Amino acid sequence: MTYYAPPGPRRGPIALLLACELLAVTLLPDSGAGASSAIHTIASTPYWNIRGGTDSVLAHPDELTEASPWLYGLDERGNVVLQQGQARTDGAAQIARLRDAGIEVTPTIANVSDGHWQSALVSRILHDPEAARRHVTDVVALVERERYTGIDIDYEELTGADRDAFSGFVTQLADALHANGKRLSVDVFAKTTDAGYDQRNQAQDYAALGRAADQVRLMAYDYHWQTSAPGPIAPVSWVRSVLEYAVTQIPRAKIVLGIPLYGYDWVGHDGTPVSWLQVYGRSREFQAQVEWDGVSESPHLTYVDGQQVRHELWFENAYSASAKLDLAREFRIGGVFLWMFGPEDDLIWAKLGQHWYLAGRGRRESS
């Protein structure tokens, strides 16, 4: 999942600013061949918000089947280590709380060290068969030692030259985890063709990863990003195109759609990630009217700060997220994961309860 914490259009009015901090959504399973009976409802709690994110997860345990706390990164030698600022005792305490609530724990390992993506480090591991075997052994040992349900791999910023080696590594890791009764998920960039739009897309072979992993988590966000022009984070037409391609490559039951729970506050082409609470605060402080873009189905606002600098802020709320959740249900994929970026508005739960009544009924009937 893309690194958003500090260490990576047409307008219409909207009456009420609601939360974008959804935690999980229950989906009906694919009824086609190879469909899984499990319905994945996943909350991602990044290490900079693991305590607050866990608090929110535990406030709604019946809505979730799985949590993926982003706890682990890689050091300069490629060893799996706790992320910066994440004390071992605090991480263990939050995981214990999740387990006590009956929530499966599948933590994330990302190739982040000192706040930066370490693509060259991962590439060296992938292209050295002995180093790749050691890495597989280390990851499996971590999962076994900590009694995790499985592991989520988020290795980003690779290139087309790493494609086959990355697919081979994922296959090797999946086989080793499956031999121990554990699961593997892998995070991939959103794309609408195999080539995608740059090297990071070319590095990820959807079909090969879909054959090996138990979940393929589509990061269907950052259509506009921190250094782009301002615009919607995940326009619904683009997310549809991503799913249309993904289901031709990956079994539907394995696809987990990532839905953004954040925004960017741009000055020119310089965007700062913001949570729902920050969006709400700025809309109040600067008396900024939230508007609705009916094409992308996204909320946004503009304001001028105290230094007379103009800001354009696009974000996700309950309405924009619901549009993506409708797509997930329409495509009958295996689940959804959402970021626990920061404090959420409790008003969202009533909205979700209403929106996902039929999906919730399907989940109860399947259990």
Image (cartoon, rainbow, N blue to C red):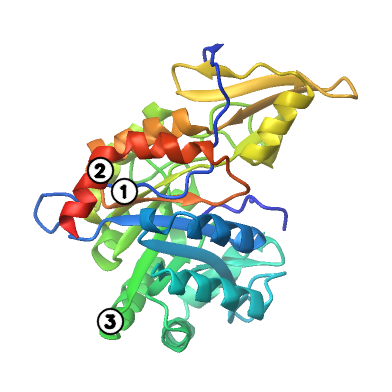
The residue singled out by tag 3 in the image is 181
User: Please, what is the three-letter code of the amino acid marked with disc 3?
Assistant: Gly
Question: Outermost residue toward the left?
Answer: 33
Report whether residue 308 is seen.
Answer: yes
Q: Quadrant of the rendered structure where residue 266 is?
A: top right
Name the side, left or right, on which 181 lies relative to 55.
Answer: left
Quadrant containing the C terminus in the rendered view: bottom left
Q: Earlier in the sequence, mark 1 or mark 2?
A: 1
Q: CA distance from mark 3 to mark 1?
A: 24 Å
Spot occupied by residue 108 in the image (x, y as percentages of width and height): 49, 67
Q: CA distance from mark 1 to mark 2?
A: 6 Å
Q: Earlier in the sequence, mark 3 or mark 1?
A: 1
Spot occupied by residue 99 in the image (x, y as percentages of width and height): 44, 73
User: Please, what is the three-letter code of the amino acid marked with disc 2?
Assistant: Ala
Pair 3/1: label in front: 1
Q: Quadrant of the rendered structure where residue 140 is?
A: bottom left
**Dot label at residue 26:** 1
Cβ atoms at labels 1 and 2 below 8 Å apart: yes
Report whether residue 267 is seen.
Answer: no
Residue drawn at 33 percent across, 80 percent down: 177
Spot occupied by residue 1 in the image (x, y as percentages of width and height): 51, 55
Spot occupied by residue 326 in the image (x, y as percentages of width and height): 31, 34
Residue drawn at 46 percent across, 29 percent down: 320
Q: Against 332, is 168 above or below?
A: below
Q: Disc 3 on helix, strand or loop?
A: loop
User: Please, what is the three-letter code of the amino acid marked with disc 1?
Assistant: Thr
